[in-house]
Amino acid sequence: MRVLVVEDEPDMRDAVAMFLREGGYSIDTAADGKDGLSKALTWNYDAIVLDVMLPLVDGWKVLSELRKTKTTPVLMLTARDAVNDRVRGLDNGADDYLVKPFVLSELVARVRALIRRAAGKPQPVIEVGGVRIDTASRTVSLEGAEVSLTAKEYSLIEFLALHLGTLVTRSMLYDHLFDERDDSLSNLIDVYVSNLRRKLGRDLITTRRGYGYLIEGE
Amino acid sequence: MIKSLRWRLQIWHAVVLTGVLATFGVVVYSLHWQTRLQQIDAELDRTAEVLMTQLRRLLPRPTPFRGPGRPPSLSRSRPGTPPAKSAANDTKSASKSAESPAVTSARPTGESPRSRGDNDRSRDDGERGNRPPRERNAFERSLASGQLPLEFQHLFEGEDESHFYFVIWGRDGVVLKKSTSAPETPYPAIHLGEEGLPVRLVRQFGDRREVIHASRFDLNVLVGRSIAEDLAAEQRYGLWLFAAGGAVMAAGFLGGGWLTARAIRPILAMTATAESISAQNLNERIDLKETDTELGQLGSVLNRTLDRLQSAFEQQSRFTADASHELRTPLSVILAHTELALSRPRTAEEYQSSLGICQRASIRMQSLIEGLLMLARFDSGQPVLETTEFDLEHVTVECIEMVQSQAETRQIKMTTDFSPVRIRADRGRIGQVITNLLTNAIRYNHDGGTVCVKLRAVDHQVVICVTDTGVGIPADELPHIFERFYRVDKARTRPEGGSGLGLSICQTIVAAHGGTIVVRSEPGSGTTVEVHLPSAV
């Protein structure tokens, strides 16, 4: 899952980005509204964490510009907790709202929930055949036995599971699983897929040669 | 309700209107009745005149002498008393009538004695003096015997259509002729005055109006008529007046009520608006439709007051929001980094980095809180200034040393131009002001720019002047730069340690010393800040 963090306070931005990365997300960062907006319009992020008080272009403006073309889930961060600020944020198209200071694990939980909801899978557990994916604890089990996966392997299986029954192209996978800092190699995806097939069974992921991958719905 | 302005006005207007209308009505009514009575009297007079003229024409020529012989039966009776028995109709005593004659006027008739005939004049001679007894002449006798000229016959027979009635009696009170409809009232024997001028009397019994003409030829003529119809008409007229007055009253009362309601409406609107205004809802304004009226002026004064109140409130709430924002930001950094550091085992370097970040955030909070506390102390009106006399040059050099490292990292040159200046002020606070100004001058300068500090004494003032070659401040931002948490360039990333309170604090300190700060700026080429302080506080 790829998430954009737009926050001007460097210490805050670093903390949020690092915590999300450690939570298995690919993170892009932007220090001001202008940069944030251009990144948000360029890439299809799974979620955006957006501070309200931003230099150059403020959070409200970024949100309203973004909403003209994209439905990316947006979590607003602000140090103002006035009710009308929150109402304004939600009315302007924000999907959730978090008031500073906040606990990072709450931020991650909210981001996770936003991504699930956007994929139309509000339940935290997705089951496909004998494979059970718990997005809350980021664990996968096969026939009741937990399977150990790397962060990227988990992200890939989760992304495919969230798009159950639909074709996921390779470029989509690259967009969503790697952030701007990753020097991704073109065959990296194939390596992860073959690892997953080895751990979870050959039939779970179907390959559409030349297009991408999918997990067939039941 | 009775105490409300509206009803007081209404009642006052109603009372005044009633008074005016009642006075007017009474005056009009009485004038009208007087006029009507004059018309009636004139009519009666005319008839009496005609009758008199006719009678005089019938009167025989006066005899050359006046004989003493007088019929004993018609001996003179006391004046004012009718004869005990009238030859024709008088059968009852006049004293039976309880009403006494209401003689309303007595005046000579319009006819002057000179206009009369010769025989009148000759009779005048006889009548002056002690009125000798005389004989009834032929005419009187003919009257008494009912031999009236034909044209008068009908007057004495039955009811006249016009309700006129006549009585003719002699000077001695003996009724000579009387119309059948004439009431039984006393017929006074009228004495002519000393000049012997004809006498006219007007009297009214109930609904009968009578005029009595006394002529010089010993005949009294009474013409009267019933005025019952006139009285009734006058009553109707009075009723009409009353009704019209009532209508005017009603119109006045309703119109007055409408006008007062209109006049009061803005007040009610103001009351409603004022009631709906609260700290949460200061946007309401009094609707000003009629700005020229006194109420409109009051309304606009209230609106201006509300504007000031609202801006003060907004400033206050903005300040609170800004302060909380500024405090939350470092707090969130501390919380986030501690959570991050504790979420899993870290290396020593990672812990060090986290602690360093937390320390920076804490220092930022500390400086912010100190600034806020200082402003609050000054705001509360009890600034604690520890004034001592000191060398300003010395303090300024200390401040420059404090910011020197900041300046060096950006290759900013610091130049000084000092005159020896001693000042009596709070040394620590003045140092704070100078440090703040220098920090701003470095922070908003271009790399490799210059900051120039000048000190000089003018009259009883000390001027500290800090000039930079930085980005400058746009003219429309200048009035706001001393506002708390105001940032000229909102796009600028918050510099480390900058709380947004620096200039506010400077201004507060300088103002507490009785000084002023003047800022001149040229966007793009630099800013000059001049602090004017009195030499001694």
Image: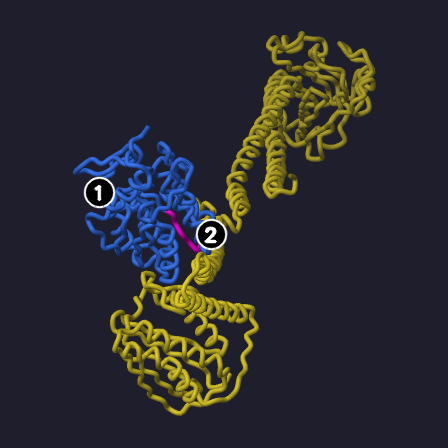
In front: label 1 or label 2: 1
Tell which chain the image draws in blue. A
Quadrant hosting residue B356: bottom left
| Disc 1 chain ID | A
User: Looking at this view, is B461 or B239 the one in front?
Assistant: B461
> To which residue does mark 1 refer?
A170
SS under mark 1: helix
Q: Is residue B301 above or below residue B394?
A: above
Residue B417 image offset from top left, x and y in percent: 33, 88
SS under mark 2: loop
Other residues around mark 2 within 10 Å, as few (<14) / some (14–19) / many (≥20): some
Other residues around mark 1 within 10 Å, as few (<14) / some (14–19) / many (≥20): some
User: Looking at this view, is A126 or A29 the one in front?
Assistant: A126
> To which residue does mark 2 refer?
A81
Q: Amino acid at mark 2?
A: Asp
Residue B278 image offset from top left, x and y in percent: 53, 49
Q: Does B457 appear in magenta?
A: no
User: Looking at this view, is B5 or A72 the one in front?
Assistant: A72
Determine if residue A19 is in view: yes
- In the image, the segment drawn in magenta is A75-80
Q: Amino acid at mark 1?
A: Arg
| Disc 2 chain ID | A
